[in-house]
Amino acid sequence: MLIDIDFFKAYNDNYGHLAGDEYLKKVGTCLKPQVNLAVDQVARYGGEEFAFVLLESHDVELIAQRCLKSIEALPVKHEFSKVEPVLTITISIGYCTIIPKKDTAPSSLIAARINLL
């Protein structure tokens, strides 16, 4: 599952890079508890994206919904977002599933067709 923070560049440009760093930390803090950290992994993937590798989670849409709700609950304003009428943090989520074989390259997962929520 990949999560992208919507219009993060506009946030960073208008509120400053220190505020942007805090914003990323808050998002990461919200996302980690949404999975079983004993077996699943959540990591920052690029500038404002987060990647989830769900090894034993079978209901990806449920996890995605939990992520959405946790982000919606953040008391962080984003007055420069183009998501209207929402002026807070929003995220976009996509996912795909594969059953890897021993020689499966990680890039094959990124190249796979992603289902958007």
Image: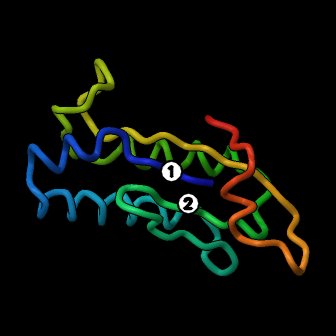
* Mark linked to residue 68: none
For the point 22% across and 46% down, which residue is it?
76
Please identify the quarter of the rendering in which residue 108 is found: bottom right
Q: How many marks?
A: 2
For the point 60% across and 63% down, which residue is it?
52
Say left or right for 19 vs 29: left
**Which image quarter holds the C terminus?**
top right
For the point 67% across and 48% down, which residue is it?
95
For the point 20% across and 63% down, which residue is it?
22
Please identify the quarter of the rendering in which residue 104 is found: bottom right
Q: Position of residue 100 (x, y in %)?
A: 86, 69
| As drawn, 101 above or below 1 | below
Residue receiving disc 1: 3
Say left or right for 87 vs 94: left
Q: Alpha-carbon neighbours of circle 1 within 10 Å: few (<14), some, or many (≥20)?
A: many
Depth check: give the residue in front, 3 or 73: 3
Q: Residue type at mark 1: give it.
A: Ile
Say left or right for 81 vs 36: left
Q: Position of residue 53 (x, y in %)?
A: 66, 67
Q: Residue type at mark 2: give it.
A: Gln
Q: Alpha-carbon neighbours of circle 2 within 10 Å: few (<14), some, or many (≥20)?
A: some
Depth check: give the residue in front, 102 or 71: 102
Helix, strand, or loop for circle 1?
A: strand
| As drawn, 71 above or below 26 | above
Q: Position of residue 112 (x, y in %)?
A: 74, 50
Residue receiving disc 2: 34
